[in-house]
Image: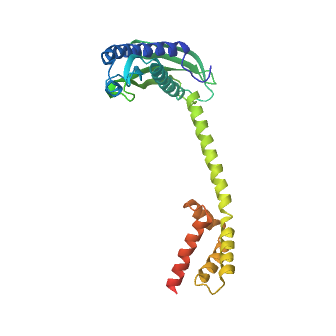
């Protein structure tokens, strides 16, 4: 065994624990909601618990027809809670396993208060043994005090590596590796898009210079703005790659952005003269 993953029996047991807890809350909320059946929709919805699925009867003017347990919400919260716990457990255990080290035994159990505890054993490439004492626990928030208004469980890891110290870099859990890969993919796409914009921006000075030449042809050298057009034309063609990169980093993207900067340069030049 190499990368640590939460044993299937632990995932199953924790899932059943959380689902049972939520079903109990859902049953109590649905039972309490029966007194609101028959009320107008806007009156009833404010009184229903978050684990209650309401059925509205339009025929009688949008009234609450029935209130039952919302099994879909219960399933959604259960899956999110278990995933949050197992992802953290796997990440923390893998941080105590070095690259090149292998696991030899996983002995975990789900105790009272949903406490995952036990030991994960392994050995180095040289055959030296180590083990990780695992203590996984949760802080609970119920109802209005919870993030989802029902039940939010905040996992915590308490564990240490015993035996030969870890040498080198730690392993990555499957979830962490996937997250890093997704981040690298986003960064690569962002860099590619930025390179594409920079290549497009490199053509902007010549495009601007041609616009200025067109204005000069159409309006002649006697036009009051002709000196500015001539300045921008020549200055645009004189821009270096370093200057363009500096302006690009500052947010410039179009020939219009370049024109605005060169206009300011022209005005400053006139004022100094």
Q: Which of the two residues, 224 or 64, is positioned nearer the viewer here?
A: 64
> The N terminus is located in which quarter?
top right
Percent coordinates x, y for residue 265 in the rendering: 55, 76
- Can you see residue 173? no
Q: Which of the two residues, 60 or 248, is positioned nearer the viewer here?
A: 60
Percent coordinates x, y for residue 94 in the rendering: 54, 27
Res 235 quadrant in image: bottom right
Res 142 quadrant in image: top left
Percent coordinates x, y for residue 209 in the rendering: 67, 73
Q: Which of the two residues, 270 or 229, is positioned nearer the viewer here?
A: 229
Rendered residue at 66%/49% (across/down): 192
Percent coordinates x, y for residue 69 in the rendering: 41, 16
Left or right, residue 77 beside residue 192: left
Left or right, residue 72 beside residue 205: left
Image height of 195 relative to 39, above or below: below
Left or right, residue 273 beside residue 2: left
Q: Which of the two residues, 93 or 126, is positioned nearer the viewer here?
A: 93
- Can you see residue 213? yes
Res 175 quadrant in image: top right
């Amino acid at each position: 065994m190499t990368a640590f993953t939460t044993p299937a029996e632990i995932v199953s047991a924790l899932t059943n624990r959380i689902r049972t807890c939520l079903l109990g809350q859902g049953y109590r909320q649905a039972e309490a909601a029966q007194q609101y059946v028959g009320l107008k929709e806007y009156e009833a919805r404010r009184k229903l618990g978050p684990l209650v699925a309401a059925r509205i009867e339009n025929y009688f003017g949008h009234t609450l027809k029935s209130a039952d347990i919302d099994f879909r919400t219960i399933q959604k919260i259960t899956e999110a809670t278990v995933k949050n716990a197992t992802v953290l457990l796997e990440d923390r255990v893998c941080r105590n396993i070095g690259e090149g080290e292998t696991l030899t035994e996983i002995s975990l159990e789900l105790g009272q208060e949903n406490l995952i505890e036990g030991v994960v054993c392994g050995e180095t490439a040289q055959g030296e043994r180590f083990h990780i004492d695992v203590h996984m626990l949760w802080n609970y928030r119920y109802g209005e005090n919870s993030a989802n208004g029902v039940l939010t469980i905040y996992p915590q890891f308490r564990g240490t590596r015993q035996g030969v110290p870890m040498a080198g870099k730690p392993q990555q859990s499957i979830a962490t590796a996937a997250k890093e890969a997704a981040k690298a993919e986003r960064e690569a796409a962002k860099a590619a898009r930025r390179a594409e914009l920079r290549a497009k921006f490199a053509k902007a000075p010549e495009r601007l210079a041609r616009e200025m030449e067109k204005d000069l042809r159409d309006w002649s050298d006697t036009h009051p703005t002709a000196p500015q057009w001539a300045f921008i034309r020549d200055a645009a063609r004189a821009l270096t790659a370093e200057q363009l990169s500096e302006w690009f980093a500052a947010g410039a993207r179009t020939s219009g952005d370049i024109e605005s900067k060169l206009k300011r340069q022209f005005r400053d030049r006139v004022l100094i003269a």
